[in-house]
Image (spheres, grey):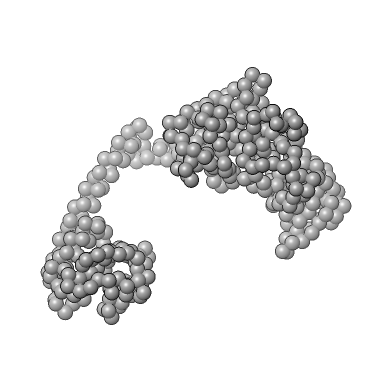
Amino acid sequence: MNKLYETNSYMTSCATIVTDSTVIDGKNYIYLKDSIFFPNEGGQYADTGYIEYNGQDIKLTDGILESSEADAKETIIRYAVEEAIPVNSNVICKLDWNKRFDRMQNHSGEHIISGLIHNIYGYDNVGFHLSDDEPVTLNINKPLSREQIMDIEAKANSVIYANFPITASYPDKAALSSIDYRSKIDILGQVRLITIGNENETIDICACCAPHVAHTGEIGIIKVINSINYKGGTQISILCGRRAIEYINHNLSIISDLGTMFTTHPDNICANVKTLREELNDCKAKISELKEREYIQMINNMCIDDLHIIVTEDELTAGNMKNLFNCLTEKFDGYVGIFVGSDTDGYRYNIGSRNLETVRLAEHMRNALQAKGGGSGCMIQGKVNAKKDDIIRTLTSF
């Protein structure tokens, strides 16, 4: 198959021939003599588009790489189509260009970020994923601080402003041995190198099979939106081009709405939220204190013969729960406890006795309610995903 997507990332249509046609698990697939459709490969989804056959546009939804030049001396790709197309049919391939260009922007942006990290710190990108719905993620094998990542982002956007060329090359093995390039895997067949830079400055050289933009300026913008510690290194999430602009505009809209709600300048929003959170925590503390007093009064009004178990949806802190448990144990012999939560989300609990063994009770709750938790002495605590009626029935029968 002639991989047109490798030599011309901007080709949006081509005439070709269907070399084979098959049905697998009830789905129609075709094979093409020439293709502009990049398959699902190298951490990137397959291109989509249409196959024009007999004046009708048939949707192409996936490209599955069956074998590559590395293991079969040629590339074999089967393309999923919504209707069967006979072998030897003359067809016209039509690429979903907007989706392709979006991926090109983001994939080329990832190369810039990874190349800069490699050049500056000597760290490697050991994992990459580009989807249409989530940010691009790249896994760096060493830790990076937020300051380092923000510096990389600034340098990456400077690379965009410089509008460096992005080119593909196919060096033979002799030439390849003298080139310092990035690669996540050992490649047995022909290596395709993507180079970002010019004769005066090289930003990155990386083995890659995917389509890329022709110049860095076409990426528009690179925005790092998150970074986390991941498997001893750093996972960085980025958005480029159109996706980055949409993300920034969305967040600016949220900031503007918050400024309107607080009737303040956006610069003051964080301070206002901090004040509001402190006031909310104070209110919660006061409510918890009042709730605790209410439950203590209820405990004092309990009779000896009552089931001394409280199950409530009221918001009580761990401190409240411990205080109420202590109040119960001081007044009553036997098993006492308090469960806080809901039938939907489950319940946190403190349960036990000042004069009875808690080990048997813990075992009973694990067997009857699949409760999780533990403890020692007179109290066990944990979490149980059970309904209120089941909790009371289980403890009543113990």
What is the x, y in percent for residue 365? 32, 72
Depicted 373 relative to depicted 228: above or below: below
What is the x, y in percent for residue 110? 58, 36
Depicted 303 relative to depicted 277: above or below: below
In which image quadrant can residue 115 be found? top right
**Which residue is at the front of the view, 98 or 318?**
318
Depicted 129 relative to depicted 388: above or below: above
Q: Residue furthest right?
A: 88
Q: Is residue 273 left or right of residue 103?
A: left
What is the x, y in percent for residue 330? 13, 68
Q: Is residue 210 left or right of residue 349?
A: right
Check the picture and name the quadrant holding the C terminus: bottom left
Q: Residue furthest top?
A: 200
Q: Residue at x 56, y 28 (%)?
A: 119
Check the picture and name the quadrant holding the N terminus: top right
In which image quadrant can residue 352 be found? bottom left
Examine the rendering and report whether any part of residue 350 can be seen: no
What is the x, y in percent for residue 251? 45, 39
Q: Is residue 206 left or right of residue 90?
A: left
Examine the rendering and report whether any part of residue 159 can be seen: yes
Q: Residue at x 77, y 41 (%)?
A: 3
In which image quadrant can residue 287 be found? bottom left
Q: Is residue 9 left or right of residue 249?
A: right
